[in-house]
Amino acid sequence: MSSKGEREKRKALLLSQIQQQRLDLSASRRDVATGWRPPAVVATGWRPPARTIAAGIRC
């Protein structure tokens, strides 16, 4: 059985992972809302195919 210290350490790790996932999701939503694209995509002029559906959003 895990000691209290091990449980607390595991809990702290899980909470930090959840926080990072929330930050990543928030940044992703902000990028979509502002139309931000990575510099490499802008430099090459790459565009998704006209009928691509990504995450339920028609591009």
Image: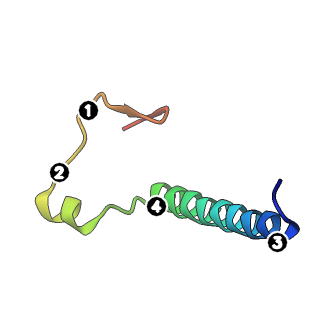
Helix, strand or loop at disc 1? loop
Q: Nearer the viewer, residue 47 or 28?
A: 28
Answer whether labels 1 and 2 touch (C-beta < 8 Å): no
- Upstream in the sequence, badge 2 or badge 4? 4
Q: Are marks 1 and 4 in contact (CB under 8 Å)?
A: no
Q: Secondary structure at mark 2?
A: loop
The C terminus lies in which quarter of the figure? top left
- Looking at the image, residue 4 sits to the left or right of residue 12; the answer is right
Q: Residue at x 87, y 67 (%)?
A: 4
> What is the secondary structure assignment of the residue under circle 3?
helix
**What residue sits right under mark 4 in the picture?**
31
Dot 1, how many residues are within 10 Å of its Cα: few (below 14), some (14-19), or many (20+)? few
Give the Cα distance between marks 1 and 4. 20 Å
- Disc 2 to disc 3, how far (Cα)? 51 Å
Of callouts 2 and 3, the N-terminal one: 3
- Going by the numbered disc 4, the residue's amino acid type is Asp
Nearer-N-terminus badge (1/4): 4
Q: In front: mark 3 or mark 1?
A: 3
Label 1 amino acid?
A: Ala
Identify which residue is drawn at 83% across, 53% down. 1
Q: Quadrant of residue 53?
A: top left
Q: Amino acid at mark 2?
A: Trp
Q: CA distance from mark 1 to mark 2?
A: 12 Å
Q: Amino acid at mark 3?
A: Gly
The x and y percentages for residue 28 are 50, 58
Q: Are marks 3 and 1 in contact (CB under 8 Å)?
A: no
Q: How far, Cα to Cα, is label 3 from label 4? A: 39 Å
Q: Earlier in the sequence, mark 3 or mark 1?
A: 3
Which residue position holds label 1? Answer: 50
Q: Which residue is mark 2?
A: 46
Q: Dot 3: few (<14), some (14–19), or many (≥20) neighbours within 10 Å?
A: few
Identify the residue under disc 3: 5
